[in-house]
């Protein structure tokens, strides 16, 4: 980037005020249309090798974070010595955020099926000397199988699907599928403080495999799950297949604000919002936290 854009990026990352939206949009558009490879340093100090063609990697480079409301909540809920299970870890932003938060006495399990992402994930773990992280290249489902997964959008490499072949396929690959209790050890599963599920429509399958274990897990365990009715339907599931069993198990749903617009990121970074109790039908992509804590704002 030229010196002016470098200065603008620095302002976006460090200014204690909201940078004008037009400047933020200009930088985001430029980095998307003129791919840039660099080392991005996140707001919690982790380093990543990034390619700005991908929205997640671009936002790490531009803002130093991904999903700022979720990231702030994870930092607030985890404590030294905790266990964090990251299912659908991508290149590891939440993984390394959790790694630093739980410290050397804690542990993180990062699960990612996409070969390139898993390589980048492991590279980030090695680069940051995150010795408390165990990575696994696997897809999560409700049975052992082999599956073909597809990437449809080169600008959103985290959007992977396996239920239906997209009309346009950017890349495809095969992955081994296992239930989460077969991937995480009993000790990891039963000591988990937070389990994050972002697996492009297989979330209901993952929850089904967790239900028999919930009674043996920590009483304060919380799950944060991306729920998208359209992608669930491709797997023959619906949001109720996630929400209803967890309610019956004593968990209350809370909705997390998660806006992917670049122009809204500076405000979200400076003023992250907590999850709020949610009793409405889920009609679009939503990030829900499930907690046994019964309150209005989590």
Image: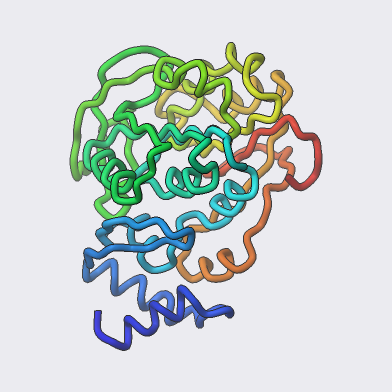
Residue 56 makes an appearance in the image: yes
Vertical arrangement, residue 83 with respect to residue 21, above or below: above
Q: Position of residue 48 (x, y in %)?
A: 32, 56
Q: Nearer the viewer, residue 219 or 58?
A: 219
Color style of the picture: rainbow
Residue 59 makes an appearance in the image: no
Kindly identify the residue that appears in the image at 41 percent across and 75 percent down: 25
Task: Pick out the residue farthest to the front.
Answer: 104
Vertical arrangement, residue 258 with respect to residue 264, above or below: above
Kindly identify the residue that appears in the image at 36 percent across and 18 percent down: 178
Task: Pick out the residue farthest to the bottom.
Answer: 4
Q: Would you say 22 lies left or right of 83 here?
A: left
Q: Position of residue 184 (x, y in %)?
A: 44, 21
Task: Pick out the residue farthest to the right.
Answer: 295
Q: Nearer the viewer, residue 224 or 102?
A: 102
Kindly identify the residue that appears in the image at 68 percent across and 52 percent down: 274
Q: Position of residue 54 (x, y in %)?
A: 30, 56
Q: Would you say 216 lies left or right of 113 here?
A: right
Quarter of the rendering occupied by the N terminus:
bottom left
Q: Nearer the viewer, residue 130 or 161?
A: 130
Kindly identify the residue that appears in the image at 54 percent across and 32 percent down: 83
Which of the 4 image quarters holds residue 284? top right
Quarter of the rendering occupied by the C terminus:
top right
Vertical arrangement, residue 272 with respect to residue 145, above or below: below
Q: Would you say 260 lies left or right of 220 here?
A: left
Q: Would you say 3 lies left or right of 211 here?
A: left
Marks counted in the figure total 0
Q: Nearer the viewer, residue 108 or 282?
A: 108
Which of the 4 image quarters holds residue 32? bottom left
Which of the 4 image quarters holds residue 174? top left
Q: Position of residue 4 (x, y in %)?
A: 32, 88
């Amino acid at each position: 980037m030229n010196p002016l854009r470098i200065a603008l990026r620095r302002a976006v990352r460090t200014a204690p005020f909201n940078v004008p939206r037009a400047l933020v949009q200009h930088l985001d558009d430029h980095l998307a249309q003129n791919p840039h490879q660099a080392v991005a340093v996140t707001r919690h100090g982790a380093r990543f090798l990034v390619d700005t063609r991908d929205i997640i990697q671009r936002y790490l480079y531009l803002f130093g974070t991904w999903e700022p409301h979720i990231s702030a909540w994870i930092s607030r809920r985890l404590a030294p010595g905790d266990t964090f299970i990251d299912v659908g870890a991508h290149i590891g932003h939440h993984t390394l955020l959790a790694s630093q938060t739980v410290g050397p006495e804690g542990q993180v399990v990062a699960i990612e099926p996409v070969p390139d992402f898993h390589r980048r994930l492991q590279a980030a773990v090695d680069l940051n000397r995150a010795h408390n992280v165990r990575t696994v290249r696997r897809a999560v489902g409700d049975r052992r199988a082999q599956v073909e997964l597809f990437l449809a959008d080169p600008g959103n490499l985290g959007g992977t699907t396996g239920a239906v072949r997209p009309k346009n396929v950017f890349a495809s690959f095969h992955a081994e599928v296992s239930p989460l209790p077969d991937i995480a050890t009993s000790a990891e599963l039963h000591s988990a403080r937070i389990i994050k599920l972002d697996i492009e429509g297989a979330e209901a399958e993952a929850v089904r495999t967790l239900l028999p274990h919930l009674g043996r897990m920590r009483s304060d365990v919380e799950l944060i799950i991306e729920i998208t009715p359209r992608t669930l339907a491709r797997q023959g599931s619906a949001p109720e297949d996630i929400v209803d069993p967890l309610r019956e198990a004593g968990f209350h749903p809370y909705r997390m604000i998660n806006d992917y617009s670049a122009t809204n990121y500076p405000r979200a970074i400076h003023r992250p919002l907590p999850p709020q109790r949610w009793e409405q039908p889920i009609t679009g992509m939503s990030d829900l936290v499930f907690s046994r804590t019964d309150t209005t704002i989590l």
